[in-house]
Image (spheres, grey):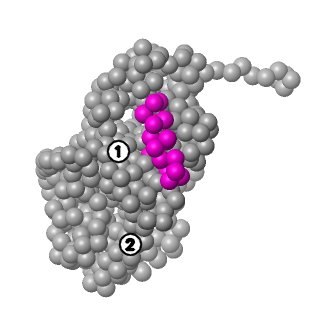
């Protein structure tokens, strides 16, 4: 009988064995790959359609985001109201998100309603018409939201840091401007839609309580559509970083807070140092107990939060430190940020601190492996970047075994403060 007066033993997350559940792959009749995972106990399904239709592929600024935002605005047979009501009637949710590289269409629905909703998604992917009134309303609303956002120092700082790292003409440095929205036409959106939605190398990801019936359903509906493979991901763009590494921008003369962004072009998942850098970044500013948080929030009281992150895109990556502080402590906060980066270059991390970080990373990973949607999200990241389960296993091994000496070597390799761009917006 269980003795509840005795606490159970505590095990570090580094001692656990991690296994990524097996993913199934099916090829539809027309060659579209379908990746599916049967897991979970609830009668709920998530379907993701992923297309290389993001900002990287656009030939005119803001057209990729506009196309994604207006995808549900109407087809030849349905208005935007009818489309939205169709999903609401079945208690389902359809989201369209546009990133730098990919556009993802995500459907969440009860299993029993899947067959009613898949034809509508197919209609959006093949027969969206982008009605004039919906397009004009989008231009008006997006312009108004942008003008409001431009008054916020953190929004402006986020725009500027990417632009100085990559150049304003590069997809990863390009940011939305009023002129790029107002100069768009429906023809621009139709052209982007035709090239990168109707003629895209689509991938479908299905997870939840799925089986043979759902697989057949998707093949019947999507497997008969015409598919044209394009070379969208082979596009090349030139990086043109700004010659000035440090910029101070006055956005609001009466502002009392400053947004700090420090960053550089960085490695992405394809680089062998990416996984060990995840550990080092976590030490610096990747979680609430990080060096930056302990120093600048807890000790100095300069901010409510400060974080560092490595952001991987398909073709490049970014390393970023971001925070907002009082106008009067901007210089002090910058000094402490660089101090913590230099300290990682000069001193070995203690084994105790490193174990805490490893347990944090691996503990979060346990949460990511709990539930079919989270598991599929991890699989989707692997597949879109050209990896398999071996990459996942190597990452686990890296998190478990990396040493303080190894992290110090990485810090000296990547934390050269002379390489960093610094944007301060008040």
| N-terminal-most mark, 1 or 2 | 2
Res. 44 in view: yes
Q: Residue at position x 52%, y 25% from top?
A: 358
Mark 1 or mark 2, which is nearer to you?
1
Q: Within 10 angstroms of label 1, few (less than 14), some, or many (20 or more) residues? A: many
Across and down, in percent, residue 113 comes to 48, 64
Q: Judge whether residue 38 is colored magenta.
A: no
Give the residue pinned by disc 2. 147
Please tell me whether residue 98 is drawn above or below residue 347 in the rendered image. below
Across and down, in percent, residue 156 comes to 38, 59
Left/right of residue 319 with respect to residue 9 in the rendered view: left
Left/right of residue 233 with respect to residue 302 in the rendered view: left
Quadrant in which the N terminus is drawn: top right
* Tag 1 secondary structure: strand
Q: Nearer the viewer, residue 425 or 43?
A: 425
Task: Indicate the quadrant where residue 397 lies.
Answer: top left
Res. 111 in view: no
Q: Nearer the viewer, residue 114 or 72?
A: 72
Q: Residue at position x 44%, y 24% from top?
A: 344
Task: Indicate the quadrant where residue 54 lies.
Answer: bottom left
Q: Nearer the viewer, residue 63 or 164?
A: 164
């Amino acid at each position: 009988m269980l003795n509840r007066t005795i606490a159970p033993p505590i095990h570090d997350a580094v001692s656990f064995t991690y296994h990524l559940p097996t993913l199934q792959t099916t090829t539809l009749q027309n060659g579209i790959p379908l990746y599916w995972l049967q897991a979970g106990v609830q009668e709920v399904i998530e379907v993701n359609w992923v297309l290389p239709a993001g900002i990287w592929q656009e030939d005119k600024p803001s057209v990729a985001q506009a196309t994604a935002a207006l995808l549900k605005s109407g087809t030849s047979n349905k208005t935007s109201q009818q489309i939205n009501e169709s999903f609401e009637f079945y208690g389902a949710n359809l989201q369209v998100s546009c990133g730098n590289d990919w556009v993802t269409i995500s459907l969440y629905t009860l299993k029993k309603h899947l067959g009613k909703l898949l034809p509508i998604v197919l209609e959006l992917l093949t027969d969206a018409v982008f009605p004039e009134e919906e397009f004009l309303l989008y231009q008006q609303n997006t312009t108004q939201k942008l003008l409001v956002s431009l008054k916020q120092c953190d929004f402006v700082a986020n725009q500027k840091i990417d632009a100085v790292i990559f150049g304003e003409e590069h997809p990863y440095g390009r940011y939305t401007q009023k002129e790029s929205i107002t100069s768009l036409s429906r023809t621009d959106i139709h052209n982007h839609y035709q090239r990168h939605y109707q003629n895209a190398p689509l991938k479908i990801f299905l997870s939840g309580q799925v089986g043979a019936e759902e697989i057949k359903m998707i093949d019947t509906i999507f497997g008969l559509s015409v598919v044209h493979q394009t070379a969208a991901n082979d596009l090349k763009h030139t990086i043109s970083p700004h010659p000035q590494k440090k910029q101070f921008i006055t956005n609001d003369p009466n502002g009392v807070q400053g947004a700090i962004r420090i960053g550089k072009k960085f490695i992405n998942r394809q680089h062998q140092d990416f996984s060990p850098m995840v550990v080092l970044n976590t030490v610096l500013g990747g979680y609430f107990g990080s060096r930056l948080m302990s120093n600048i929030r807890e000790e100095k009281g300069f901010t409510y939060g400060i974080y560092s992150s490595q952001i991987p895109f398909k073709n490049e990556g970014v390393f970023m430190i971001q925070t907002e502080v009082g106008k009067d402590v901007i210089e002090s906060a910058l000094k402490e940020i660089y101090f913590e980066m230099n300290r990682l270059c000069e001193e070995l991390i203690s084994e105790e601190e490193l174990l805490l970080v490893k347990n944090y990373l691996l503990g979060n990973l346990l949460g990511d492996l709990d539930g079919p949607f989270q598991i599929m999200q991890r699989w989707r990241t692997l597949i879109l970047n050209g990896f398999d389960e071996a990459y996942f296993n190597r990452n686990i091994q890296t998190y478990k075994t990396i040493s303080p000496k190894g992290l110090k070597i990485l810090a000296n390799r990547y934390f050269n403060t002379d390489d960093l761009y610094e944007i301060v917006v008040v």
